Amino acid sequence: MKSTIQTYGIAVLIGLVVFILLVATASNIGLTWDEPAYIAAAQSYVKWYGFVFTNPEQAFTQKAIDYSWSVNSEHPPLDKAWSGMIWSLVRPYTDDLTAHRMGNMLLSAVLAGLLFLLIQDVYGRWAGLAAATALFTMPRFFFHAHLSALDVPAAFSIFVVTFIFWKTLHRRHWGWDLLLGVVWGLALATKINAAFVPLTLGIWWLIFRRDARLFARFVVMGVVAFPVFVATWPWLYIDTFTRLGDYIAFITTEHWEIGQYYFGQFFMPPPWHFGFVMVWAVLPLGLTLLYWLGFVRSIKERQDGGLGWLLFLSALTPILAIAVGQSMVYDNERLVMASFPFLAGLAGSGFGWVLSAWKKFSATWNRHLVSRGGVVALVALAFLPQVITMIRLHPHHLSYYGEGVGGLRGATNLKLETTYWCETYSLALPVLNERAEAGDSIWIDPWSHDVMIYYQTVGWLRDDLVILAPSKVESVLGWQVPAPVSIPMQQADWYLFQHRQSTLGFDGEDNSILRILAGKEVVYEYRFDDIPLFTLYK
């Protein structure tokens, strides 16, 4: 009992440390491309919930539901509703962007604690600690853990379903079947990526269990999940099957295309190996070696009940999904974010294996100093290189590349994408606020106008500056600010350019955007290891 309380106490402490670290670094993380849409949705949804309490009869009319829930209706609502509720509670105590991100930072903290519990239960406490540390020393995951976006919440929800499945394997009461169905329904209501979870669990079942009672759990899980999914999404209360069909069409065949720069070419879609290469490229080499060691351990020792295989299959599924699927959206590692917690779990297992071997080896010398020195050396080798790079690169972790490709400079030589998602735009704010004339127009990468408009909305960018859009489009924050203006790029006064090669499309270095920028004055440029990430032109 004492040991159990201690274990859960450590899990809570890990979550608390992660939460404090994320909140402490949040103000430096620039707004990203997708966040304004989710922020607008979060505010709209939470207002509707307030309307439910004050006027329930009107709240459930089609007019009220369409008004509130059409905002970002192309994605399920659960995380946006959660973020909106946390935002409404903490906004008096922090800035607006941090308040919108707070809900997902809480989920990230819980994920750290759950990952520790899952791994330490089978592989030991050191392995659990190493797993949680591995996840948050993956620089790109650390970055995404701050955001008011859906990728880390999707990873969290998929991990929770897998966690509960593993923890309740030997519990036969039907209540656990219902619980798993409810949790999977909530995961589907977070992001569609969770649809692949039964496939992963089913393959694991075929390898390790194959008992009818566990198969029945999958059936109940599926039956329960669908009504839970619908119940969480008021937008589906009207014309349920029509809107559900529209949603499925959007996520499969009708999503707007977002291509990918990859090995010096623009692809839509990239080759099948894109996901595998990106996981290799953006993870620290030490962690890559450890997670492969963790998988080898599960094959060699066969004493973990199949947990190593469950982690491996759960990490592999998101990568295979984009390798064999027909996704319309590619943003570097973002779509395989759900793999990272499971890879961190395998890395923790690998760390524990190496540590155990070292302790057995050093015991022959019977010297505590040698044993402890080896532990310190192992920790340093596993985590210190990426921590040093994270500190140097902070907060621009979307430009992190691991030692396996030679860091950012090596990735540039391989012609992988330098950065993405507009987080570097925040670097321009102090310069524009100080030097721009009233009425000056600002050109930004196509379709990222809402990032700058949000900065105006919260007062971080002067509101007398004009944001340009590639065509006559409305901001998702349109009820708060004027719509962006569409004029030819050549007529702009300022140019914000993140070095995202996908922006240039098929034209590459001959792109008209670069030809126009070549004749402009460079006012400010941010570089890392002599590679430009962001340039402000006048």
Image: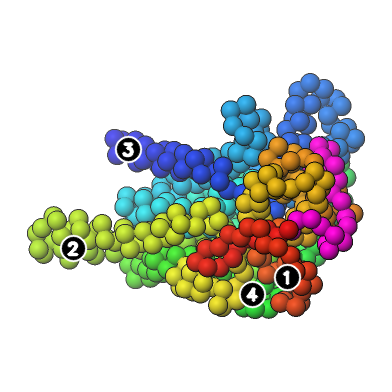
* Residue 46 on image: x %, y %: 73, 33
In the rendered picture of this protein, how many numbered marks are placed on residues? 4
Residue type indicated by callout 4: Tyr
The dot on residue 309 is: none
Which residue is label 4 attached to? 262
| Disc nearest the viewer among 1 and 3 | 1
The dot on residue 6 is: 3
Which residue is label 2 attached to? 360
Which residue is label 1 attached to? 518
Q: Are marks 4 and 1 in contact (CB under 8 Å)?
A: no
Residue type indicated by callout 2: Lys
* Residue 462 on image: x %, y %: 74, 41
The answer, for residue 116, to whether it is visible in the render is yes
Residue occupying image coordinates x 39% and y 66%: 286
Residue type indicated by callout 3: Gln
| Disc nearest the viewer among 2 and 1 | 1
